[in-house]
Amino acid sequence: MNPALADVVVIGAGQAGLSAAYHLLRRGLDHVVLDAEDGPGGAWRHRWKSLRMGTVNGISDLPGAAKPAVDPAEPSSEFLSRYFGGYEEELALAIRRPVKVRSVSRADSNPLGRLRITTDDGVWSARAVINATGTWTRPFWPIYPGQAGFRGRQLHVADYVAAEEFSGRHVAVVGGGISAVGLLAEISLVTSTSWFTRRPPVWRDSGFDGRAGHDAVALVEERVRQGLPPQSVVSVTGLLWTPTLRAAAARGALDRQPMFTSLTPDGVRLATGELLKVDVILWATGFRAELEHLAPLHLRGPGGGIAMAGTQVAAEPRVHLVGYGPSSSTIGANRAGRAAVATLLKLPQLAAPAQGRQQ
């Protein structure tokens, strides 16, 4: 069976993928969006119900369509799935789901040739690929001595449902990011908690203005330009105090401890050598970019990352990564979608009018 043809294949229909699709549509480029989810919303479909619109970090409007009125009490998973779904319908975006991309490879040795996208629902052939697969499907689990022998429960933020399931048990939360402190604030209302991080957290007393955001993104961007694995923008900006977090701090929930050295069957061994009884360990240790399907292209460098020039992979100009590194925020994802399409239009194989390109 011959592969289906498109100028551009977008992989993923979260914020970054929808932004890219919007700009591809505006520029008249033949494209398709392949999304592994059963419905709209991207990773937001899987956020815990207690993450409500009144507490979630700022969500940017999708390009060309402002968010509808927001009920602060509505779970973000429900609101954003509905918003994304309405957006897809209004623009009649070419989205196919559920389609899981297995691999992206070069169809031949021609640097201006096509890329082959193999999925669980057939094969596509494209002149370029915009990868927008995000990180939610690749939770990062650190490895510590004694982990396999721990008799309590271990779960990652990706598996979190609600604080009430931990009632009566002592919960150790590991991680220094927004999810860690947000869940500490929530869980500490119903049970006892301990907080562990590798480094002391950095807190911001002032608001996060445009200059601070620009500087933070620039630092992450420099890393990916050098081919290093990207840091999260939050790791650069620090944590912002909110009334909820100040209340958690007042009740001792944010009394951070240095990282424990090992796990025991009934708890953890502290940096001091003491044993702490723990029933549950919640690993709020972040995510890694979902890029395994790009492995046949051999994009990673010696530093473990992928050298980037904006959204474009430096070593493979037919491939763009959006929602990656400096564009992992919702604002950055929107901008990255636009930038990727603008850059793709400079490729010789896409710069010609559609009627002049041979499929």
Image (cartoon, rainbow, N blue to C red):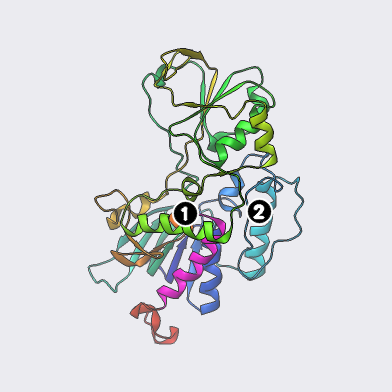
In the picture as drawn, the residue positioned furthest to the front comes out as 205
Give coordinates of residue 55: x percent, y percent.
68, 45
Q: Which residues are magenta?
A: 328-345
Other residues around mark 2 within 10 Å, as few (<14) / some (14–19) / many (≥20): many
The residue under label 1 is 133
Residue 296 image-quadrant placement: bottom left
Which of the two residues, 48 or 359, is positioned nearer the viewer here? 48
Q: Left or right of 252: which side holds 344?
A: left
In which quadrant will I find the C terminus?
Answer: bottom left
Give coordinates of residue 241: x percent, y percent.
62, 42
- Residue in the picture at 62% in, 60% down: 60
Against 150, residue 222 (above or below) is below
Q: Amino acid at mark 1?
A: Thr
Against 197, residue 83 (above or below) is below
Q: Could one spot residue 162 in this view of the protein?
A: no
The residue under label 2 is 80
Q: Left or right of 182: which side holds 237?
A: left
Q: Amino acid at mark 2?
A: Leu
Magenta span: helix, strand or loop, mainly? helix
In which quadrant will I find the N terminus?
Answer: bottom left
